[in-house]
Image: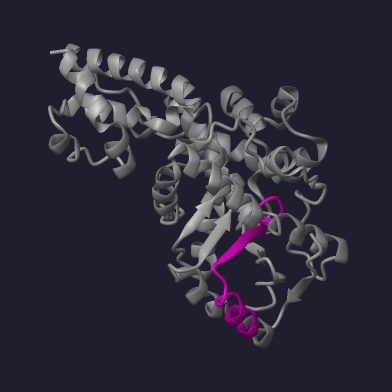
C-alpha cells in the first residue's frame, strides 16, 4: 500500500492530525513501547492509519496527547487494533485515554477459528502481505529514531483496516460478529493493576514450590532486584534472571564462594551484586519462624458431587459445540463461567441471565442449549 507516513512530533501537527482523523469512520492503531529496555515501560510511538493517511506520533516529544482523546472516545469511529489488551492498558496508563468502539483483529481471528493469530502470520495468510519484524525488539525510546525504524513502525498499521473489513465480513457470514463486538467492548475497559504491597513472589513462577524459609529468601532477592532495576531504570530480567534467583533462593548461599559454586551468576553479576545478594540471604534467614511468609493457597474449593457432575457435562457439551463450530472451546465459554453455571444450576433462561459471568452473546446463542443440557441431568 503506497501511503506515505508522516512523523508527528509537535503539538500543532498533533492537533491538525487529530482533527483530520476525527473525520474518518475507522482508524487503525498500533503502539511501540520500551519494556525491554527500561524498568517502568512507556509508550514510545503511536501509529495510526486510515485509507488516506498514516502517521507516527511521538509521545516522548509531545507530552500532552489530549487532542487524541475525543477521537478514541468517539463511538462513531471504529478503532482497529491487533491484540489490543496491552495497547488499551498502556494508552490509559500513560495518557488517560479511554477507547470506545474498539475492534480487535486478533480476537476476530480467534473467533473465526484461525489458529495462527500473530499479525505476521495473519497478514501473510489472509492478505498475502509479508511484514518484517526485525525491529520489534529494538529500543523505541531512543531519539532520534532512524528513518528505517519509523518506516517499520508505520508499515504494520496500514494493513489493519483492510484486514478488519475482511474479518468482519467473515464473522457476519458465520453469525459471530456480535460475539466479537461484545468481547471488544469488554476489552476496551481493561486496565493495568495498581501497585500493591503484596509479596513479589506472588507473581513469580515456581514460588509455590518453596517453603517458608526459602520463600523468605526469594522475597528478599526479588526486593533487591526490584530496587536495583528502579535505580538503574532497567528491566528486571536485565538485572538478574528468574532462574538464577530461584537457584540462589533454593541454595541459600552465605558466602561468595558458595554463591559462585551455584554457577547462577555471570562474573560481572558476581562483581556487581554478589555481596548484596549474600547479605539479602543472610537477613532472610534471620526472620523468626512465626514471621515467615506463606505462599497463598490456590486450592479450589471442593465442589459438591452434583456440581462436579454438571461441570463435567457442560465441558463435554462445550467440547462438542466447539468441534462443530471449529473454534477453541475456551472462546465459547471459559472454565470459570462453566463452574458458575454449574453452581447456580439455572432452570430457565431468566435464571441464566443472573449468571453475571455470562456475556449477552453467550446467553442469546447458547442459553437454551445450556438449560436443556442441565435439565437432562435432573
Residue 293, picture quadrant = top left
Residue 257 visible? The answer is: yes
Quadrant assignment, res 157: bottom right
Q: Residue furthest front?
A: 173
Residue 94 position within the rendered picture, expressed as x and y whole percent measured from the top left = 54, 66
| 110, 92: nearer the viewer | 110
Residue at coordinates 55% horizontally, 75% vertically from top-left? 68
The quadrant of the rendering that contains the N terminus is bottom right
Stretch in magenta: 15-38
The residue located at (61%, 45%) in the rendering is 225
Q: Is residue 367 magenta?
A: no
Position in image of residue 175 (x %, y %): 43, 40
For the residue pair 347 and 342, the one nearer the viewer reads as 347
Relative to 66, does residue 190 appear above or below in the rendering? above
Q: Position of residue 365 (x, y in %)?
A: 32, 35
Name the side, left or right, on which 339 lies relative to 253. Answer: left
- Residue 34 included in the magenta stretch of the image: yes
Residue that extends furthest to the bottom in the rendered view of this protein: 12
Q: Position of residue 348 (x, y in %)?
A: 13, 31
Amino acid at each position: 500500500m503506497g501511503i506515505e507516513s508522516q512523523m508527528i512530533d509537535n503539538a500543532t501537527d498533533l492537533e491538525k492530525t487529530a482533527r483530520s482523523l476525527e473525520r474518518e469512520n475507522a482508524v487503525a492503531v498500533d503502539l511501540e513501547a520500551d519494556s525491554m529496555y527500561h524498568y517502568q515501560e512507556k509508550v514510545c510511538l503511536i501509529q495510526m492509519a486510515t485509507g488516506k493517511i498514516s502517521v507516527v506520533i511521538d509521545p516522548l516529544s509531545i507530552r500532552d496527547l489530549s487532542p487524541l482523546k475525543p477521537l478514541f472516545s468517539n463511538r462513531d469511529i471504529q478503532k482497529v487494533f491487533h491484540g489490543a489488551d496491552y495497547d488499551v492498558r498502556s494508552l490509559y496508563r500513560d495518557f488517560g485515554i479511554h477507547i470506545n468502539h474498539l475492534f480487535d483483529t486478533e480476537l476476530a481471528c480467534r473467533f473465526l477459528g484461525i489458529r495462527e493469530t500473530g499479525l505476521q502470520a495473519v497478514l501473510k495468510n489472509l492478505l498475502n502481505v509479508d511484514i518484517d519484524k526485525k525491529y520489534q525488539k529494538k529500543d523505541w525510546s531512543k531519539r532520534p529514531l532512524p528513518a528505517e525504524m519509523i518506516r517499520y513502525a508505520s508499515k504494520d498499521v496500514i494493513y489493519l483496516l483492510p484486514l478488519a473489513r475482511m474479518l468482519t465480513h467473515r464473522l457476519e457470514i458465520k453469525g459471530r460478529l456480535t460475539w466479537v463486538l461484545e468481547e471488544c467492548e469488554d476489552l476496551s475497559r481493561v486496565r493495568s493493576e495498581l501497585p500493591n504491597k503484596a509479596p513479589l513472589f506472588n507473581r513469580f513462577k515456581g514460588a509455590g514450590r518453596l517453603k517458608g524459609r526459602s520463600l523468605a529468601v526469594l522475597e528478599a532477592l526479588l526486593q533487591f532486584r526490584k530496587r536495583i532495576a528502579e535505580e538503574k531504570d532497567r528491566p528486571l530480567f536485565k538485572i538478574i534472571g528468574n532462574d538464577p534467583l530461584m537457584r540462589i533462593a533454593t541454595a541459600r548461599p552465605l558466602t561468595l564462594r558458595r554463591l559462585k559454586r551455584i554457577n547462577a551468576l555471570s562474573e560481572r553479576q558476581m562483581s556487581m551484586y554478589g555481596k548484596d545478594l549474600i547479605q539479602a540471604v543472610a537477613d532472610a534467614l534471620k526472620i523468626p519462624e512465626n514471621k515467615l511468609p506463606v505462599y497463598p493457597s490456590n486450592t479450589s474449593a471442593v465442589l459438591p458431587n452434583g456440581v462436579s457432575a454438571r461441570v463435567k457435562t457442560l465441558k463435554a457439551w462445550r467440547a462438542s459445540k466447539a468441534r462443530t463450530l471449529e473454534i477453541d472451546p475456551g472462546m465459547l465459554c471459559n472454565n470459570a463461567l462453566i463452574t458458575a453455571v454449574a453452581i447456580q444450576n439455572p432452570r430457565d433462561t431468566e435464571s441464566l441471565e443472573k449468571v453475571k459471568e455470562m456475556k449477552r452473546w453467550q446467553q442469546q446463542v447458547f442459553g437454551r442449549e445450556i438449560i436443556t443440557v442441565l435439565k437432562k441431568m435432573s
